[in-house]
Amino acid sequence: MIQIDDLRKMYQIGDQQIQALRDVSLTIHEGEFVAIMGPSGSGKSTMMNVLGCLDKPTSGEYMLDNYRISTAHDDDLAFIRNQKIGFVFQSFNLLPRTTAVENVELPLMYSGVPVRERRERAIAALQDVGLGERLWNKPNELSGGQQQRVSIARALVNNPLILLADEPTGALDTNTSNEIMSIFQHLNDAGKTVILVTHEPDIAEYAKRIVRFRDGRIEEDQLVEVRRLAY
Ligand code: ADP
Ligand code: ADP
């Protein structure tokens, strides 16, 4: 589903060139749960931006679901991103004066889904992440963990191919982090492909595979013993 070959990403700052990613080759199949790890500056964010079709590589190839992302036009990239990828961020990024249901409906508005269907799908997505009792609450009436569930429901509602989560537990306490990771695990058990960026080893252990970056290169790529909580 994801096939990356000899990918490089350079940044130009003045007359200085920074190689944020070099010689990166990576294959990710449907149904995998991959954690991307590495120290600060190792290229995780850059990799996430490329994987999420927010940014194109400088050279090399990136194929996503048979689309050649590496040479796609920006308009096509935006379309592919909206169709194929659900994003979850550390800071939730919810609209503050808007209910959980309305927040989750937002991506469906952009893709032109009719009002009734929007509502049904938003409610179903919130139920999927265990928030069926909080449909009409606004973000400031929800705990951090509940807000992150809303953002996971929003990421899921378009039924994307991949769930891409960037430090999704970075703003949460340990117990809540474990609950959120169990939700990702639950979604992965149901077949969803999940890619997670984290610098926390305890969080990465929820994934089935850990890819470690150092200095813009993949240093290690291993299948791991999966950590599980009682769900
Ligand atoms: P990480 O997420 O692992 O901290 P990044 O991908 O943010 O790593 O950064 C990798 C390298 O690329 C670092 O040296 C960083 O300073 C540089 N870098 C990242 N983004 C940019 C950018 N937009 N412009 C210039 N340099 C960048
Ligand atoms: P994270 O904490 O997630 O690793 P960073 O602090 O590395 O994030 O980067 C935050 C944002 O700033 C990212 O979008 C990254 O691409 C950009 N960035 C990182 N380093 C630089 C840099 N040296 N110059 C310009 N932009 C940068």
Image (tube, rainbow, N blue to C red):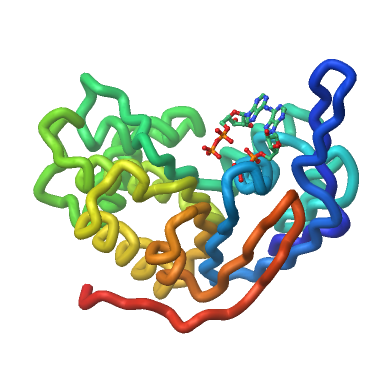
Q: Quadrant of ligand 1?
A: top right
Residue 54 vs residue 14, the one in the foreground: 14
Image quadrant where residue 78 sits: top right
Check the picture and name the quadrant holding the N terminus.
bottom right
Q: Horizontally, is 173 left or right of 110 in the view?
A: left
Q: Is residue 146 above or below residue 184?
A: above
Q: Residue placed at 80% from the left, 57% from the top? A: 24
Evaluate whether residue 193 shows in this view. yes
Residue 176 pos. (x, y %):
22, 55
Residue 49 vs residue 200, the one in the foreground: 200
Q: Horizontally, is 140 left or right of 227 in the view?
A: left
Q: Is residue 182 above or below residue 162?
A: below
Residue 87 pos. (x, y %):
48, 43
Evaluate whether residue 80 shows in this view. no
Q: Residue placed at 48% from the left, 53% from the top? A: 198
Residue farthest along the bottom direction in this orientation: 225
Check the picture and name the quadrant holding the C terminus.
bottom left
Q: Residue placed at 68% from the left, 70% from the top? A: 220
Residue 100 pos. (x, y %):
22, 36
Residue 222 vs residue 94, the one in the foreground: 222
Image quadrant where residue 32 sits: bottom right
Q: Residue placed at 48% from the left, 28% from the top? A: 110
Q: Horizontally, is 231 left or right of 164 in the view?
A: left
Residue 151 pos. (x, y %):
34, 42
